[in-house]
Image: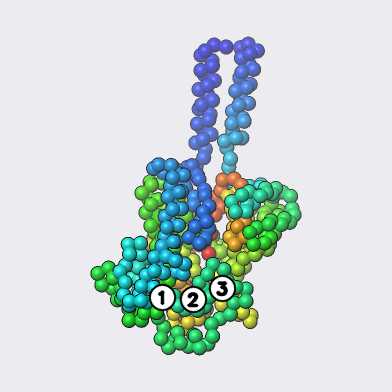
């Protein structure tokens, strides 16, 4: 084996390693929450950084809280308060929607083996 | 480097990639959120359908928007035109667009003993529940309005059917299929998904779901929203082909003088149904599950088990205001209660 061969082999191994991290995305906890208003992504929040965030929606302000790797809607205009009632969300693919204010909060990543849906 | 070695490396790479891809236990996944049918509709597709996923998602959105526009109870629609014609002539021909709604909706109303009654459009309007949003200072109707309803309630039972026409002697009857339209539309949607030969799919239309197939070898896991607070009461294991519908008093309503007035009205009393917070029904017929969830909520804590038997339901779960959960034996088997929910479970045996 020449030095070139060794280099190629090393390159191949690195390629496989990078492919692994690229293609292999296990379900489970996602680490970012994507927030959109009326279908447009307005911000992406790191769930490891605790804090409160105000999102301007169609009717008013939706207030979000990030803590302990989770996120919830604390306050949002709307008669039914469904997104506030949803409480904390933390699993990849989980989401909550404040429909009157057109605000969608969604944890990125493919859903793990958490819930496939919620009935209410 | 020899050509043979290059080939060997390439083969190993291909094998490794295939191996990694094979690790994924569930088929391809696509998720889309649609704002149709006056609610948020979440569609999750597993595997590839006949045609493309994008085309299927477009068909789904189109089908739901169409039904929403045709079946709307207070905005200009085939249904409001039908109501107007009944009022003008005391009879009307059933247009094709309304045939499935009237056919299924009216027969289910009869099966529920008119606890779910599409003839209550006027009552729903009097309560202010026609309209996308509720005024913050909403008030219940005057006592005289409720008394007048109780003295002579309108009912879909007053409709006569002959040869594609309907007639009524009570011309002010206003049909509103809000308690069953979503179930009928989702039933049509499930047929569409089956025809597309999708491996598995779940459609969640504002908290009411249909499923096709199963994701891999496991059941669908469906959380039941906690009526008394945040998060979920517990999780239900749902098999492919099952529909899950919940009717709850917290979904829509208004607060007045310290009392919560919600949108599920008892046709007999003219008032919001009393005694239960929510009812969840699982059945393979989405329309029946939808109608039954409303009918059992109206039936209340004493009568719901008998109505469930009358409707041949096996899987029912009800939540009382004190957070007591009562489930039929079959439903209890699917349920794992969330330890943090503070709910207690009682299982009842139904024949």
- Where is residue B124 shown, x and y percent of the image? 48, 76
Whether residues under marks 1 and 3 lie with C-beta atoms below 8 angstroms apart, the answer is no
Q: Is residue B56 above or below residue B161?
A: above
- First along the sequence among labels 3 and 2: 2
- First along the sequence among labels 1 and 2: 2
Callout 1 and callout 2 share a chain: yes
Q: Residue furthest front?
A: B88
Q: CA distance from mark 1 to mark 2?
A: 9 Å
Residue A77 occupies quadrant: bottom right
The subunit carrying tag 1 is B
From the image, state whether disc 3 or disc 2 is nearer to you. Answer: 2
Q: Which residue is mark 1?
A: B174
**Residue drawn at x 33%, y 64% as measured from the top left:** B95
- Where is residue A73 shown, x and y percent of the image? 66, 60
- Quadrant where the N terminus of chain B sits is top right
Q: CA distance from mark 1 to mark 3?
A: 21 Å
- Quadrant where the C terminus of chain B sits is bottom left
Residue nearer the viewer, B324 or B181? B181
- First along the sequence among labels 1 and 3: 1
The subunit carrying tag 2 is B
Q: Is residue B213 left or right of residue A63?
A: left
From the image, state whether disc 1 or disc 3 is nearer to you. Answer: 1
Residue nearer the viewer, B28 or B10? B28
């Amino acid at each position: 084996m020449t030095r070139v061969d060794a280099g190629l082999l090393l390159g191949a191994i690195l390629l496989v390693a990078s492919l692994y991290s690229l293609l292999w995305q296990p379900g489970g906890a996602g680490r970012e929450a994507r927030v959109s208003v009326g279908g447009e992504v307005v911000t992406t929040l790191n769930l490891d950084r605790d804090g409160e965030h105000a999102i301007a929606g169609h009717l008013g302000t939706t207030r979000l809280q990030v803590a302990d790797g989770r996120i919830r809607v604390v306050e949002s205009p709307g008669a039914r308060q469904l997104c506030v009632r949803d409480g904390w969300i933390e699993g990849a693919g989980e989401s909550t929607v404040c429909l009157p204010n057109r605000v969608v909060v969604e944890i990125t990543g493919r859903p793990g083996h958490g819930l496939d849906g919620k009935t209410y | 480097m020899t050509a043979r070695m290059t080939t060997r490396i390439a083969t190993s790479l291909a094998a490794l990639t295939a191996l990694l891809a094979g690790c994924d236990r569930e088929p391809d996944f696509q998720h889309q959120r649609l704002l149709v049918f006056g609610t948020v509709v979440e569609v999750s597709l597993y595997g590839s359908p006949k045609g493309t996923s994008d085309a299927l998602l477009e068909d789904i959105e189109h089908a739901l928007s169409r039904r929403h526009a045709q079946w709307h109870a207070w905005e200009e629609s085939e249904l409001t035109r039908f109501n107007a014609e009944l009022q003008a002539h005391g009879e009307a021909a059933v247009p094709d667009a309304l045939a499935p709604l009237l056919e299924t909706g009216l027969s289910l109303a009869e099966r529920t003993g008119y606890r779910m009654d599409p003839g209550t459009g006027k009552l729903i309007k009097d309560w202010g529940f026609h309209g996308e949003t509720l005024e913050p200072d909403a008030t219940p109707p005057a006592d005289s309005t409720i008394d007048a309803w109780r003295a002579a309630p309108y009912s879909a039972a007053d409709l006569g059917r002959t040869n594609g026409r309907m007639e009524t002697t009570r011309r002010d009857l206003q049909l509103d299929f809000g308690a069953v339209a979503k179930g009928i539309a989702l039933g049509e949607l499930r047929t569409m998904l089956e025809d597309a030969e999708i491996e598995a799919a779940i459609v969640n239309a504002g908290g009411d779901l249909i499923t096709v197939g199963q994701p891999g070898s496991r059941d669908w896991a469906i959380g039941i929203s906690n009526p008394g607070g945040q998060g979920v009461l517990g999780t239900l294991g749902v098999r492919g082909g099952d529909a899950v519908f919940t009717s709850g008093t917290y979904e829509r309503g208004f607060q007045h003088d310290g009392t919560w007035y919600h949108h599920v009205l008892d046709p007999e009393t003219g008032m919001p149904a009393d005694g239960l917070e929510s009812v969840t029904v699982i059945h393979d017929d989405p329309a029946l599950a939808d109608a039954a969830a409303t009918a059992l909520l109206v039936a209340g804590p004493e009568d719901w088990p008998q109505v469930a038997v009358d409707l041949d339901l096996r899987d029912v779960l009800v939540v009382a205001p004190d957070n007591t959960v009562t489930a039929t034996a079959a439903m209890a088997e699917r349920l794992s209660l969330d330890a943090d929910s503070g709910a207690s479970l009682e299982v009842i045996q139904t024949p």
